[in-house]
Amino acid sequence: MTLLRRLRGLVSTALLWALAWGIAGAAAYAVLGVRWTLQWDRPLTVAEVMPYVLTGAIFLAVYGFLSGAAFAGVLMWVERRRSIRDLTLPRIAAWGALGGVGVLLLNLVLVLLTEDGMVPDDTVRVMTIMGVLGAACAAGSLALARRAPERDGAGDASGPSLLNAPGPDRPERAERRSRPPLER
C-alpha cells in the first residue's frame, strides 16, 4: 500500500471519528448546559444552551480526530498483514478503545508532570466513556469498511488495482498482463 493511500485512510478515519465524537459532544454538552442552566431557577433559552453545545462539539471533535488518527495509525502498524475480512470485531473494538483512551492517557501524564500531581476525580469515568466511544467508532469503521465495494487491491495482498484493470479504453493493459515475466 502506498504512503499516500495510508495517509488518506488515516485522515479519513480521523475525520469520521471527529464527526461522530462532535455529535456526541454536542448532545452531551447540551444536556449538561440544560442541567447547569436549570440550577439557577430561571427560564431556559436556546441562547444560553448554545455555547455549551458548540463547546462540546468542538472539544470532542478535536479529541475524536486525535483518537481516530491514533486508532488508524495503530491499526496500520499492528494489523497491516490482515485484510478487512480477517479483522474481528472484538479485536478492532479493543484497538478503538485504546485509541479513545490513549490520547487521554497522554494528556493525563502531561498533567501529572506539569501540575501539582493531582488527578481529577472523574478521570476513571471520563476514560470509560472515551474507551466506549472509541470502541463504538472502531466497530462502526469496520462495518463501514466491510460495506465498501471490494477492490481488486492496489498494491496490497488482495490483487491488482481497479485502476490498472483492462477495459475497452485500455486494451494495452490486458496485453501487458498476459505476457510472462521477463527471465534473467
Image (cartoon, grey):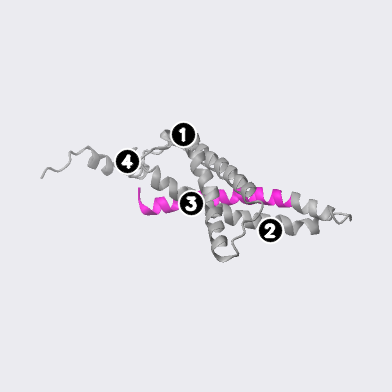
Q: Amino acid at mark 4?
A: Pro
Q: Position of residue 141 (x, y in %)?
A: 52, 42
In terms of sequence position, does the residue under pointer 2 or pointer 3 come before the other? Answer: 2
Q: Amino acid at mark 3?
A: Ala
Rendered-image quadrant of the C terminus: top left
Mark 1 and mark 4: Cα distance apart in space? 25 Å
Most common SS among magenta residues: helix
Q: Amino acid at mark 1?
A: Thr
Which range is magenta?
A: 1-30
In terms of sequence position, does the residue under pointer 2 or pointer 1 come before the other? Answer: 2
Which residue is depicted at the point 78% across and 56% down? 49
Q: Is residue 6 magenta?
A: yes
> Which disc is residue 160 wearing?
4
> Which disc is residue 55 wearing?
2
Q: Residues within 10 Å of mark 4 (few under 14, many from 20)?
A: some
Q: Is residue 32 left or right of residue 174?
A: right
Q: Is residue 179 left or right of residue 44?
A: left
Q: Which residue is the site of mark 1?
A: 88
Question: Which is more foreground, mark 1 or mark 4?
Answer: 1
Mark 2 and mark 1: Cα distance apart in space? 35 Å
In terms of sequence position, does the residue under pointer 3 or pointer 4 come before the other? Answer: 3
Tell me the quarter of the picture where residue 56 sits. Answer: bottom right
Secondary structure under badge 1?
A: loop
